Image (tube, rainbow, N blue to C red):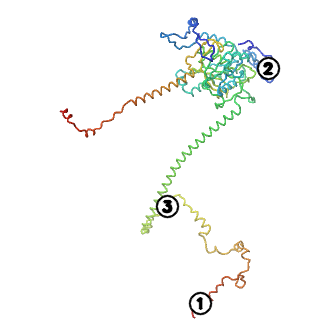
Amino acid sequence: MPDDLVVAQPPEDSVPSKKRKRPKSAEKKGKKKKGVDVANPVKKMTWTNKQRALVFAARGITFHARHLMNDLKVLMPHAKSDSKLERKEGLYAINEICEMKNCNMTMFFEMRKKLDLFMWLSMVPNGPSARFLVQNVHTMDELRLTGNHLKSSRPLLTFNKAFDEQPHLSLIKEMLKQMFATPNMHPKSKPFYDHVLGFTYLDGRIWFRNFQITDQTEGSLVEVGPRFCLWLIKIFSGSFSGNVIYENPNYKSPNQYRTELKIAASHRYKAKAEKNAKKAAVEIVPKEDELDEIFHTITQDELKQAG
Amino acid sequence: MIVLENPLLEDAIVDEDDGENSVEEMEIVGALKSGKISEQGIKTISHVNNIPKLKERLEAIQMKLPWIETMDVTVDLKVPTEEMKLVINDNFKQEMLFYKQSQIGAQQSIARLKSLGITTQRPEDFFAEMVKSDEHMKRIKEKLISKQLTMERTEKVTKMRKMKKLGKKVQQEVLKKRAEDKKQMLDNVKKIRKGKADQEEADNFEINTEPETSSGKKKEINRKRKAKDSKYGFGGKKKIAKKNTQESYKDVSSFSSRIHSKPKRSAKNDKRKGGKPQRPGKIKRANMKSKSKSK
């Protein structure tokens, strides 16, 4: 992480006047809290964690993928956007773009054949980075879910236990955590907690869900969207570079999957054709007509032979 | 060692030049799974899982930040492995699992936030932009309502269909009963006709040969008959009905000056000229007849 990103505290004037209200209220809260609980470890509520994420895509993504990306941007007030990356630029250019945009991590979408959506998560200057296949995409717009929450309230993150069981998953968990957690007191965020992001590792994939908390005491939730699931392909030690440090043994590329389907279909055709050929090969022997013998004239030779 | 140079071009480029080094390294690590050359010389597919490197990278990116910065919770749902298989194959169960995880996580986080003395709930008078616009929510609402309406409609239609089926049955029964009644009545009539001679006998024994009319069925009204009755009268007194009364005397609605105020036509002041000669009176004609006969 570059040093300039870990600035301890911004000068007061740097905060736009429009958004000054929120830090003030937070200070008040801090005071109150001090009065209530002195032994609290959290000293002062200030915006100290200056992480920013660059969320953007390569050229050639479909509208559906773009909508998913925009939904995620809405959920991440600390996200920055950029114009689409040209294909010729190469992935390594992303690191420079992130540096220019003051971002220390990136979520990058690319699409192949206008069919398969891939997502890169990367911690920018030094890595690691991970590449996922994005499946089961449903954007907020197409899901007619009744939940809704404040636009930039900070999410609560939940992970299931499976993330702690394998080293590559715990690394992914840390990356997801930093990516999706909005920094405390972020000027664009709102100081209320009304939604949960759920990351579940199930069936070899990471499932993403977003729920609104409708009742905090009872803990009832209503889903908001979007939905997608990530299938890990590889983890690289650097950011869009470096050695492969993990490779998913179960991953099957969509191209391979499609060819397998085709081959299976061709097998089916072949089997059918063979069966038909076998049927055709069985010769139909006509039955002998018994009445044919009636009209047979017995010759002298035949009589002699019969004895 | 597998080095990624341009991942857009290829997923992984296997660099076999420094193979020996990496093999050694990996063996020390104890995580060697990279390509092995089998007896036939065919390279088997293998997968990298460099655990120490993964751990090192994790340590490198971990930030020592207070919990409030990330607010993450790890939830252990403790689903048995057998049940997990069922969950994987069942979408509904899967969604339930996600929901439960988020629910438990949210409860834990909110409790923790409250213990830190942070207000979690948004005040009711705090309005701000939401993730989904009002228009979007309106669309969702409309969709829900239309869904409900269609469901109600289909329910109604099925109910109606059932009722119709039942109604048909009832009607059939009614028609059957009516036909039976008619048949019975006709039989009775026949019996009566046949047994008219024995009427006295029947009277003696006080047998009611007529069919019972008080079966609850109403007699059908002949509307045409009714209309005619009201027009021409039916029943009641006939004697005084045509007499003048005070009212009928005073009623001059039938008087028309056009007709009634003209001077009466008579033979004397008949202005009609030409035409047929008037027919002589009865006596005159008789006399004329007798005269001609006597001739």
Residue identified by numbered label 2: A15
Q: Is residue A292 above or below residue B218?
A: above
Residue B226: horizontal and vertical position, in percent? Answer: 59, 65
**Mark 3 and mark 1: span between their CA atoms?**
70 Å
Task: Say which residue appears at 71% left-offset and 33% top-offset.
Answer: B134
* Numbered disc in front, either 3 or 1: 1
Q: Quadrant of the image for the C terminus of chain B?
A: bottom right
- The kind of secondary structure element at disc 1 is helix
Q: Quadrant of the N terminus of chain B?
A: top right
The amino acid on which the numbered mark 2 sits, given as a three-letter code, is Val
Between A121 and B227, which is closer to the camera in this rendering? Answer: A121
Q: CA distance from mark 1 to mark 2?
A: 142 Å
Q: Which disc number belongs to residue B289? A: 1
Mark 2 lies on a secondary structure that is loop
Are the residues at dot 1 and dot 2 in contact (C-beta closer than 8 Å)? Answer: no
Query: Do dots 1 and 2 share one subunit?
Result: no
Name the mark nearer the viewer: 1 or 2: 1
Mark identifier at residue A109: none
Q: Position of residue B234 (x, y in %)?
A: 59, 69
Q: Chain of mark 1?
A: B
SS type, badge 3? loop
Q: Which residue is mark 3?
A: B212
Above/below status of B200 relative to A80: below
Residue toward you, A31 or B158: B158
